[in-house]
Amino acid sequence: MHESATEAAQDSNPRTSLPAPLMREMPGARPAVPVNAVLSGLFGAALLSSAFLLFCIEPMVAKMLMPALGGVPAVWNTCLVFFQGTLLAGYLLAFASSKSLRPWAQVLLQAVVIGAPLFSMPILIDPRLTQRFAGFGPMLQAFATLALSAGMPFLALSTLAPTLQRWYAAMRAPGASDPYFLYAASNLGSLAALVAYPVVIEPYLGLHEQTSLLRIGYAVLAVLIGACAVARLNFASPVDCSAPRAQFVASAAPSGVRRKERARWVFLSAVPSAYLVAVTGHLTTDVAPAPFLWVLPLAAYLVSVVLVFLSIPPIRHAWAARLFPLLATVSAYLIATGVAEPLAFVLPTHLLTFFGGCLLCHGELVRTRPDPQRLNEFYVWMSVGGFMGGVAVAVVAPQVLPVSIEYPICLVLALIARAPASPIGGAHRKWSWAAAPPLSILAGALTLARLSLHLPIPARLALALAPAVPFLVCYALRRRADFGWCLGAAMLGGAILPVSQVGQVLFRARNFFGVVRVERDAELHLTRITHGTTLHGSQSLAGAQRTEPLTYYSRRGPAGDVFAAYATLPALPRHVGVIGLGAGTLAAYALPGQAWTFFEINPAVVRIAMAPAFFTFLSDAFPGGKNLRIVIGDARVQIASEPGDYGVLVIDAFSSDAIPVHLVTEEAVASYAGKMAPSGIILWHVSNRHVNLGPVLAAIGAAQGWFTLGRRDFLHPGERRTQDVNASCWIVMSRDRESLASLPNTWQPVNPRPGFRSWTDDRSSVLPVLSL
């Protein structure tokens, strides 16, 4: 289709539109039609639909990938980085086509890009495909699987936001001179998807149903894009209005100014992106790697974008700049002191602080946005920053930082963004004396807090608020440009030396699965292993006591009950399987003639449990390693190739305090059953502060004909200080009632919850069993 030279010139410089509805012919233009409302509605619907599909794909694909990589929180962060990288590739493709191709060629290219994924749908992740890349490490394994399974449709959808806005800017339509309102519409569609997925889609639709509906939705979107393409070729404005509007930063600027401008776009995009990955990891580590916790921070991120890009933002930028320091101070205190409960307070506090930081950074982006002539360039640099921020936290930080301090770092960077003239430079001049009071008070506060752990209760209460002092001092300095540095200094002590930590750190390792730490308490003569914020086992250093199982596994507790009953059932095979190694504490129950197999996904945990310098449960129970096997990898995958015939199978798999959902589905229990003796026992350790797995296992047991009992183990007064015993919750299942008959009456039947649907690989939602 031929287009006049005037129209082609307009495509390269589309910044304004005719101010009134077009109802007459203009020289050199096609017959005019009343297209204002139709065009804005068409492009708005296309952008909203594309964004909705894009952000339905993200949690859906991540949920499909989760079982193949152990169900750990890092899987979602890896998916976020992949999506950010693909989004950048889509924006680069749109930018290149707008610069080098004529309108008809742009339309043709977009038709090919949008049409190609129709031949690769529905989106499904084959576990066999994931296993092909097992030798590359979990992160590269995830990237390769995502690229082959979902890369094409995600790339196609990623090109639409800048392309459609660019097309709209070149047309006779309302708002064509300022098409950024369409960016808010696009993010509104993203937000709708993030709300709908955990609330409506995930609880009521299985993954296969979701992929089928996605294919239909994508076909409808392709039709909308086709209509937009026709409109683009037929309603281009013939008027060249090249002068930039006053509300935009002028495009004619020296190259040095351009470089600073782009660097600031990258910085202001990278900070909220990195912050998004960091806050998501922080929240999902101690609850569950579940879609509703993935989408809450992402929804807050997108709401901030929607609000600041509206023509009249409902939240003034100055308000965000004033409120964020207060929210940041509160969150910094929670981070430094390790406060994680109650969830009903902690979760909204972190999310609200994150939202304030995003409002601040995205508001600065809006203040420096260019005129629509440079729209695609603006989006490209925003995507570069977003990708860099995600990579910094999800990929680089686990490799270079021995502890998880990226979250407080992102909080500080968001505060630095308050000073637009010099986001980094200038603030350092006076930060040393300004940070000195918080640092000195912090040192004293942490010392007092550590000492308070050994003081009587009244003295502890008197010193409980001591760590808050440095944060109050910091907040008093909130009007200074170096406030962020001061708050970062106050958090540093809490990140490196948590108040709850007592003892010498013997070993620390960080990898894809999180941070594992071994500590020695000289006063109580104990060695402990922690993963994230959760204790995973401890051992006494006092002679004969070192063979005693402690923490959640004491002999008088649920684990002791089950293994005592197992010893009285000679008909059961003498083969025990344990999913989750920890310190190897359960090996204390091993008897002569028994063979034990441990399944552990984290190689760092295996190194710790096997090292006699740290723990001796395994070496004491299995001298020389006889009758002991340790299988490294995801238990669900590895157990499928095991010969089986277990008498007892213990499910004790945690990632910090999160429970991998794929190990607690009907299909998972069926696979365990296939590896067990007919009268075998499955013992579940389901202690969790926020997720109640009782209804899940009761529903699975009822569906598959298992007898299900549960027991909660509570502490006696003073017991923890003398024996290091922890409260815990356990559930036991067997197809043979007699296998459970010898358990004490403290074990009670776990009855299914009316109306509750058990989890399957296709459908599972944490929301119904969440405890705030």
Image (tube, rainbow, N blue to C red):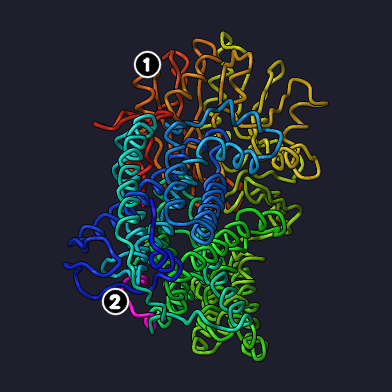
**Location of residue 428 (image quadrant):** bottom right
Magenta stretch, residue numbers:
307-319
- The residue pinned by badge 2 equals 312
- The residue pinned by badge 1 equals 705
Residue at coordinates 69% horizontally, 19% vertically from top-left? Answer: 595
- The earlier-in-sequence mark between 2 and 1 is 2
Residue at coordinates 76% horizontally, 45% vertically from top-left? Answer: 614
User: Relative to the observer, which residue lies in front, 515 or 529?
Assistant: 515
Residue at coordinates 41% horizontally, 52% vertically from top-left? Answer: 295
Local secondary structure at mark 1: loop
Vertical comparison of 317 with 211: above or below: below
Residue 744 bears which disc, if any?
Answer: none
Callout 2 amino acid: Ile
Residue at coordinates 33% horizontally, 44% vertically from top-left? Answer: 221
Residue 169 visible in this rendered orientation of the protein: yes
Residue 205 appears at what percent x and percent y?
Answer: 32, 34
Vertical comparison of 273 with 284: above or below: below
Judged left or right of residue 718, residue 202 is: left
Label count reads 2
